[in-house]
Amino acid sequence: MLHDPTIALSRFGLGPRADQPAPSDPRAWLRAQLQGADPLGLSGHDATNAGLAAVSAYQDMKKEQREENGGKGPNQTADKKLPNPLQQKFNSDTVAYCANALTTQTPFRERLVWFWVNHFTVSHVSLPIIGTLHPFIAEVIRPNVTGRFVDMVLAVMRHPAMLNYLNQEQSFGPNSRVGLRRGKGLNENLARECLELHTVSPASGYTQADVTSFARVLTGWSYEMKNEPLGFVFRPQTHEPGDKTVMGRTWPEGEEGGVMLLTWLADHPATHRHLAEKLVRHFVADVPPEADVKRIETVLRETNGDLGATSAALIDLAGAWQPLTKFRDPQDYVVASLRAVNLPVENAHMMPAALKILGQPLFKAPFPIGWPDRAADWAGPESLLQRVEFAYQLASRMPQIDPASLGSTILGPLLAADTLAAIHHAGSRRDALALLLSSPEFQRR
């Protein structure tokens, strides 16, 4: 028996588009999206290295401006008129990211990209990140979405965007040559977040001593943005010498010790459990059904963290085909709304602006844990009023849409009779479309 295509489009995808036909076999449609490479994925680190070079060139330009101004900093009046090429490129790439969300033919795969981008949060907080965040998504997240989790972890932990975000370039082995000469010490951010958020989670029982020892393992992991070759670099002169013990196991010194430890963490039973809970929470319910969690945990364990097999297993979860109950976060809601009205791709810039107003600005999660995935964090009265206002403003741009017909197209049997009646009795098409996009059933996926 075929499952409801509306559920496939909304729960697994990014919401239906009126101009894209619903799949006749939803599960086959979802599985097909897991085959082959991501259409926007990039191999290697060419884009990352180009971003680092651009950051370095921009910093040199600003230094020259300061020197020309007698060392007093750039001329503020003139500086305001100068375009920031880094920010311009970042903004352009962000709009392209949004445009893809509006038009992609593989929305399940794109949702998986979103999930892992949030799992490995990197916030747009510094020049190196402005230059490398989109390459991080294209070169690290997209190519590994259906690959092995360990490969994704290793790629993430070596990427300049993550290294910069969590200040890893500021971590020095206290007994390393540089550490002893400069009196520098550890920065534990990367080690702590890798254990707490990216892999085993606190449920594994690791201690603060494990975090500190892990930070020692990772000393020397940094990146180069001035001299060739650009990108990830291991700096022996900042690496803490000697073996280290983390979570009851001893790891050798050198870069290889970090690779060995990360490989072990990525395939740890506690990591399988942690990932299973997050995936089921995202795709099924705020309180993940234990049977579904166990199923995904088992697939991760038996396949050594094969994310393609894990994603395919999500499609077959019993809970995934229940009525839509997940409350859409602002990003989900805005994208679903813009897809529903077939927003022309040239207007994709509306998405970042709307998300800023609705409290979930793109790539600006306030903490490394990323954005929350429960209704309680997004369904407050003020947030709901902001959504109504967004729906009303969007409806004003779409006077040609028949809201009742659109509701039947994008929600199918999920469109409630009360909502349909309210649409028919609305004072104008704008009011009716705003009612549809604000309705309880449209708020859920």
Image (tube, rainbow, N blue to C red):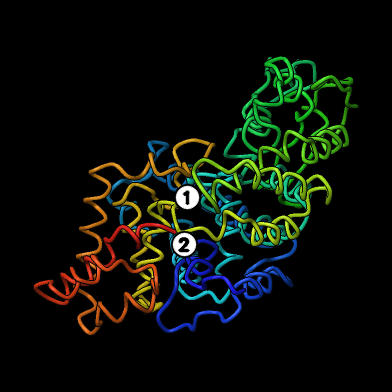
Residue 54 is left or right of residue 178, and the answer is: left
What element does badge 1 sit on?
A: loop
Quarter of the rendering occupied by the C terminus: bottom left
Q: Is residue 8 above or below residue 234?
A: below
The residue indicated by pointer 2 is 94
Q: Amino acid at mark 1?
A: Phe
The answer to which of 186 and 23 lies nearer the viewer is: 23
What element does badge 2 sit on?
A: helix
Q: Is residue 176 above or below residue 200?
A: above
Tag shown at residue 45: none
Tag shown at residue 363: 1
Residue at 55 percent across and 63 percent down: it is: 12
Residue 306 is left or right of residue 127, and the answer is: right
- The location of residue 189, given as percent across then percent down, is 62, 28
The alpha-carbon separation of the residues under discs 2 and 1 comes to 9 Å
Residue at 35 percent across and 55 percent down: it is: 355
Does the residue at mark 2 contact the one at mark 1 (Cβ under 8 Å)?
yes
The answer to which of 9 and 75 lies nearer the viewer is: 9
Residue at 48 percent across and 76 percent down: it is: 103
> How crowded is the residue under tag 1: few (<14 C-alpha within 10 Å), some, or many (20+)?
some
Q: Is residue 7 above or below residue 69?
A: below
Q: Amino acid at mark 2?
A: Thr
